[in-house]
Image (cartoon, rainbow, N blue to C red):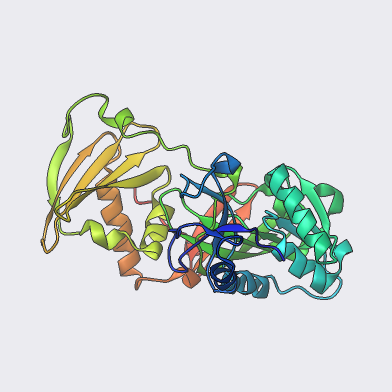
Amino acid sequence: MFVPDRIWPGIADGTRQSPVVDRTKDPEGWFRAVYADIPLTTQWDDGSHTGDGIGKTPSSSSSQPHMVFSMLADLDVGDGHRVLEIGTGTGWNAGLLAHRLGDENVVSVEFDPGIAERAGENLRNAGLSPRLVVGDGRKGHPGGSPYDRVIATCSVREVPGAWVEQTATGGLIVTPWGTLYGGEAIVRLTVRCGTAAGRFTRSSAFMRLRQQRADRPPHGAYLKGRTWPADGAGRTTDLSPADVGGWVEQFAIGLQMPGAFWSVERYDDGTYTLWTYSTDTHSWASADYVPGADSFAVVQSGPRRLWDETEAAYHWWEGQGRPGFDRFGLTVDSDGERAWLDSPDHPVPSAG
């Protein structure tokens, strides 16, 4: 009732998509995809993509059912609770909440007018009518506050202050949260006296809130027309570039390296270069991966020694017992955001 005729089925443990499945051409394949425990991309490139191919950036989806219900379990709604949802998408999650709590207790905000219109049609066809608002999800919807629960179906790099302000004392905010560097998990925050704090509950991989998408400078902004290694200083490292690529490893490193991101340049022989950059374009590092090697060539340039930071961040994580997402937490208040390990009294350090 909520999934459109054309979908690009995803892979449950990754961020890649399969070729398009069209209900009018392959109804059995469409049905299997819809009822599989996988995410389904429903829009590419903010709606500008056309055709059957895979677009550049997925921009709307029907989330993996297991993740939908895991997040609803984290949300822990009760009779009479008022819920604010950020990211209506197909309308399915808003419909589940409206079915459980009543239409009058659910407000859902969607930035894309076309997606919001289709979600409204889906919900009406299902006999449901929660309040749908077209607008900037960062601002929430103050006209319906205070809310007992806030849930986002898109990821954020910063929890908007409006969500905290519009949540009742003792209320919960459940949202995917990730660093610029990489890695993401669901955080479950309890709001008290203008502060929201809580632990991460599980790994996730959601599309970013449109207004918080990263604007990463291109590779050419760093070497500035010079041939690599330019002015970089070389050394070797025992830390394999492959060791820092896991989802929780990226998360732990990203917490300690604000303003840093990476890309990979792959070669036909199975080797690759892991590039790390600072957003100010002043610093970069390259680390060359060779399968089976014990040490790896590194070049660094700029005021930030980004591979040194990567090593320090990785070894801190390793020294803490290689913690999973559930040992990390987040505090959000008027001073900003602070990530911690095990307790707010144990803040995650900076690797710089």
User: Residue 46: image x %, image y %?
Assistant: 58, 42
Residue furthest to the top:
225
Q: Quadrant of residue 349?
A: bottom left
User: Residue 75: image x %, image y %?
Assistant: 69, 70
Residue 67 visible: yes
Q: Quadrant of residue 220?
A: top left
Q: Residue at x 43, y 71 (%)?
A: 324
Instruction: Name the quarter where the N terminus is drawn.
Output: bottom right
Q: Quadrant of residue 177?
A: bottom right
Residue 147 visible: no
Horizontal arrangement in the rendering, residue 255 relative to residue 30 (left or right): left
Which sits in the foreground, 330 or 1? Answer: 1
Which sits in the foreground, 193 or 256? Answer: 256
Q: Considering only vertical position in the picture, is 192 above or below 221?
A: below
Horizontal arrangement in the rendering, residue 222 relative to residue 7 (left or right): left
Residue furthest to the front:
25
User: Residue 40: image x %, image y %?
Assistant: 55, 61
Q: Residue at x 76, y 65 (%)?
A: 95
Q: Considering only vertical position in the picture, is 18 above or below 280?
A: below
Q: Residue at x 83, y 60 (%)?
A: 124
User: Residue 47: image x %, image y %?
Assistant: 60, 42
